[in-house]
Image (spheres, grey):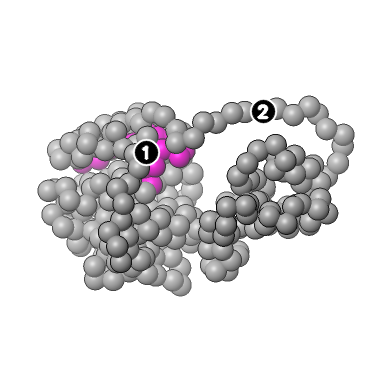
Amino acid sequence: MPAPSPLPALPVTSILPELLRRLEHDPGVVLIAPPGAGKTTRVPPALLDAPWLAGQRILMLEPRRLATRAAARRMAQEHGETVGETFGYRVRLESKVSARTRVEVITEGILTRRLHDDPGLDGVGCVILDEFHERGLDGDLAFALLRDIQDALRPDLRLVVMSATLDGAAVARLLPGASVLESQGRQFPVAVRHLERPAPRALPETLARVIADVLDEEPGSVLAFLPGEREIRATQAALAAQRLPASVSVRPLYGALPATDQDAALAPAPRAPARWCWPPTSPKPA
């Protein structure tokens, strides 16, 4: 496989040296960065050669299966590898790791089950809790267990808590000796536009009309968020009635979809004229 090209800089790139410097001496860091800053895929690789890690593994916790698999795949792709080499993942009933794996992306539930068999996290030097603002029972339990491990068994274990919207100071108070590091800037500009109040109609028909208008006005693909699978399917049907151009492919994305269908939804458009429209919801963690 040819050597990967140098990675383009993302907003989080500028604070990686400071993150490494702090983790040299501190037991943890709370990293606050806007969505799209690159924290999920750039922080774990940046830590791999840190002297304090001493060749140990990094675990990164994600709240959803889809994000777990996608993060590992993206890091492997950016470093010219296949999943399961340096970068791998574990979710319920599926894993792609090997003896070479240094960064293991897992769901929060997988961590709690792992701690039952390996309470000291042998061979792990750092645990990253990504998207920590998506608070849930598994995430809070994982955080509490990791703090206990730091105090009782592994004072050398580093914890990195990452979030886009979290109150960093409040979390840092739960991590004695930790500091807050903020990354400014987004990878893409964000504009908010409010529509006039539409005539009463069902959500799927309203959203389908808005998506069709956006596809007419803007280049590129569309990502539309809906409450759940039922609304996604209804909106998909409503979009079919809109007679979209042949270059537009509508791809549903939710946690109950088979992994192959999720992968297909996240794949790039096959050719330049093609465009994706995703109506996703937040897939369930495991």
- At label 1, counting other C-alpha atoms closer than 10 Å, the crowd grade (few under 14, some 14-19, many 20 or more) is some
Q: Check disc 1 and report its element: helix, strand or loop.
A: loop
The percent coordinates of residue 246 (x first, y second) are: 73, 57
Task: Rate crowding at label 2 as few (under 14), some (14 to 19) or many (20 or more) other CA atoms within 10 Å.
Answer: few
Residue 36 lies, with reference to residue 253, above or below; the image says above
Identify the residue shown where x is 48% and y is 48%.
136
SS at mark 2? loop
Answer with left or right where residue 236 lies relative to residue 222: right
> Mark 2 belongs to which amino acid?
Arg
Specify start and end residues of the magenta stretch as a single range. 26-40
Residue at x 72%, y 41% (from the top left corner): 216
Residue 10, label in figure: 1
Residue 31 shown in magenta:
yes
84 part of magenta stretch: no
User: Image height check: is 251 above or below 205?
Assistant: below
For marks 2 and 1, the one nearer the N-term is 1
Q: Nearer the viewer, residue 68 or 118?
A: 68
* Frontmost residue, 245 versus 137: 245
Residue drawn 49% across the image and 44% down it: 134
Residue 258 percent coordinates (x, y) = 58, 68
**Residue 112, percent across and down?**
37, 60
Q: Residue at x 32, y 63 (%)?
A: 81
- Look at mark 2 in the image and give the residue it sits on: 193
Q: Is residue 78 above or below residue 122?
A: above
